[in-house]
């Protein structure tokens, strides 16, 4: 029976494997000792607890990601408010508000002052409509303007969704996010967080699912090169072993963009990346703190309140890469106390700087993203950096895996 060989056990590779396992023979190879790639949990010795490599936020409109979580049985580990509600805290102006898009598609919430950003008018929100028609060569800033709403909503929203400064970010990719979330109404905008950790929701149940379906999973299996014969991939060369591919075998390459570019001669792929900084503090969230708070007027952008820790995300974080970790921890802890409304000495902390968290979501980089098909008839690509039409997100990664799996299954 033909076999599908999937390289890379991030969410793209895992979702491809989950799609195919059971109906087809599947082998999943991962270079690291664990699965999950950029979306996983690990035990952190300095905090003495299991944390995520970075806080991840989903929205209820992320249908592919949620379908994947449901299929593997991880959806029960996602939590969030029953309706779309985003608490914000402005550290400079000492002001708080809650953004509450209404559930249905007609956005009457923008006419309700207690549901929108303070000091904004309903018309300010029309920027979202314009974004739906953005061209792929346009950058985001001109769509957002520079008023209150840009400072208090568009910047925090789009910097985190695209992990790229709006001055250089793609307006079309921002439009794609809006089309699938805000344009669908509040029902598609409920924030969801993996409260027991990313691995418990997205990775461990997938590995159990795959093992249950008889898939072969190998860790520490780093693909070094691919041998080609004419229009097909003929062999996979791992450090330990070379695997000759049968005529009908398929390969899904679900590794990062730079690794794919090294493995595949002539591949067009994004080659600029943006950083995300996460700060984790071993301090249980105070009872009245929401699961998620948007923070304005500081370095902190989003504050996550977990039962055992407080965690902060800063996107497009190049400006902090050279800042000493201790300095960052002190600064962010001061902001966390102000945002959460308490005072306490700096607890045990961890700062994680992911330098290449995502590809830079600029028009130029977006144009470099390849589709799932390659010039080799049995080799397909998956990954958040392939042309999913979305920025680098869990939703994009899962969709890319499902698409590659569909192409393989169609051929088999
Ligand atoms: C800090 C941080 C915060 C984020 N926040 C969010 C968020 O809030 N919401 C959201 O939706 N998304 C977020 N993202 C993005 C999201 O994590 C990614 O889009 C997604 O995890 C990408 O999955 P992937 O499978 O495409 O790639 P990866 O996770 O990079 O998977 C690639 C896998 O391939 C393996 N590999 C590499 N080379 C080889 C080789 N030669 N042989 C075998 N295996 C190999 C790697 O070890 C890795 O496991 C965030 C990312 C980071 C880093």
Image (spheres, rainbow, N blue to C red):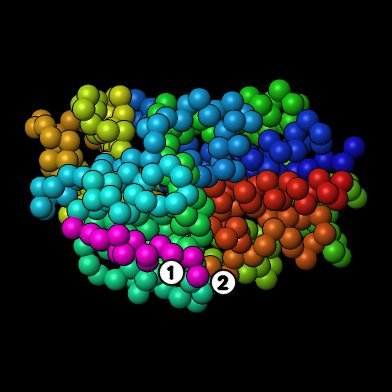
Please identify, in this view, whether the residue under mark 1 or under mark 2 is nearer the observer: 1
Q: Is mark 2 within 8 Å of ligand 1?
A: no
- Seen in the picture, residue 250 relative to 309 is either above or below; the reply is below
- Sequence-wise, the earlier of marks 1 and 2 is 1
Question: Does residue 237 appear in the picture of this structure?
Answer: no
Label 1 residue SS: helix
Residue at left 58%, top 70%?
Answer: 368
Residue 251 in percent (x, y) is at 76, 49
- Quarter occupied by the N terminus: top right
Q: CA distance from mark 1 to mark 2?
A: 21 Å
Q: Which image quadrant is residue 243 in?
A: top right
- Seen in the picture, residue 185 relative to 280 is either above or below; the reply is below
Residue 255 in percent (x, y) is at 60, 51
Residue 126 inside the magenta-drawn segment: yes
Residue 59 in percent (x, y) is at 45, 43
- Residue range of the region highlighted in magenta in the rendering: 119-133
- Please give the residue where the numbered disc 2 appears in the rendered image: 367
Residue 32 in percent (x, y) is at 55, 40
Give the camera-side residue of 331 and 31. 331
Residue 8's disc number: none
Residue 84 inside the magenta-drawn segment: no
Residue at left 79%, top 49%?
Answer: 408
Question: Does residue 267 appear in the picture of this structure?
Answer: yes
Residue at left 42%, top 26%?
Answer: 196
Q: Main secondary structure of the magenta part?
A: helix
Left or right of 190 in this view: 69: right
- Please give the residue where the numbered disc 1 appears in the rendered image: 130
Label 2 residue SS: helix
Left or right of 197 in this view: 208: right
């Amino acid at each position: 029976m033909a076999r599908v060989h999937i390289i890379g056990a991030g969410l793209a590779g895992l979702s491809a494997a989950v799609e195919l396992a059971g109906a087809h023979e599947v082998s999943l190879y991962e270079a690291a000792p664990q699965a999950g790639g950029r979306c996983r949990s690990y035990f952190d010795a300095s905090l003495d607890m299991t944390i995520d490599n970075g806080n991840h936020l989903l929205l209820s409109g992320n249908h592919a990601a949620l379908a994947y979580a449901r299929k593997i049985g991880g959806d029960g580990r996602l939590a969030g408010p029953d309706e779309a509600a985003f608490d914000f805290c402005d550290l400079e102006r000492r002001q708080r508000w809650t953004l509450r898009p209404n559930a249905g598609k007609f956005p009457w919430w923008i006419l309700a002052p207690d549901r929108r950003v303070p000091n904004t008018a309903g018309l300010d929100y029309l920027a979202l409509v314009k974004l739906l028609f953005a061209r792929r060569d346009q950058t985001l800033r001109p769509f957002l303007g520079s008023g209150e709403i840009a400072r208090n909503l568009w910047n925090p929203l789009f910097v985190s969704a695209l992990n790229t400064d709006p001055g250089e970010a793609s307006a079309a990719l921002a439009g794609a996010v809006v089309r699938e979330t805000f344009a669908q109404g509040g029902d598609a905008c409920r924030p969801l967080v993996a409260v027991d950790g990313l691995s418990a929701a997205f990775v461990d149940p997938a590995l159990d699912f795959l093992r249950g379906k008889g898939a072969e999973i190998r860790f520490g299996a780093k693909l070094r090169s691919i041998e080609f014969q004419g229009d097909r991939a003929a062999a996979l060369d791992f450090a330990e072993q070379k695997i000759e591919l049968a005529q009908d075998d398929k390969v899904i390459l679900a590794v990062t963009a730079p690794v794919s570019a090294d493995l595949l001669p002539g591949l067009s792929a994004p080659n600029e990346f943006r950083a995300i900084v996460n700060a984790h503090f071993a301090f249980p969230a105070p009872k009245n703190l929401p699961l998620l708070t948007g923070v304005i007027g500081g370095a902190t952008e989003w504050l996550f309140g977990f039962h055992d820790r407080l965690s902060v995300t800063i996107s497009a974080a190049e400006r902090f890469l050279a800042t000493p970790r201790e300095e960052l921890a002190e600064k962010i802890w001061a902001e966390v106390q102000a945002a959460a409304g308490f005072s306490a000495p700096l607890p045990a902390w961890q700062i994680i700087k992911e330098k290449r968290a995502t590809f830079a979501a600029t028009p130029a980089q977006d144009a470099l993203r390849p589709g799932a098909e390659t010039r080799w008839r049995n080799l397909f690509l998956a990954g958040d950096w392939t042309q999913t039409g979305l920025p680098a997100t869990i939703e994009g990664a899962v969709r890319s895996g499902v698409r590659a799996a569909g192409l393989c299954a169609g051929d088999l």
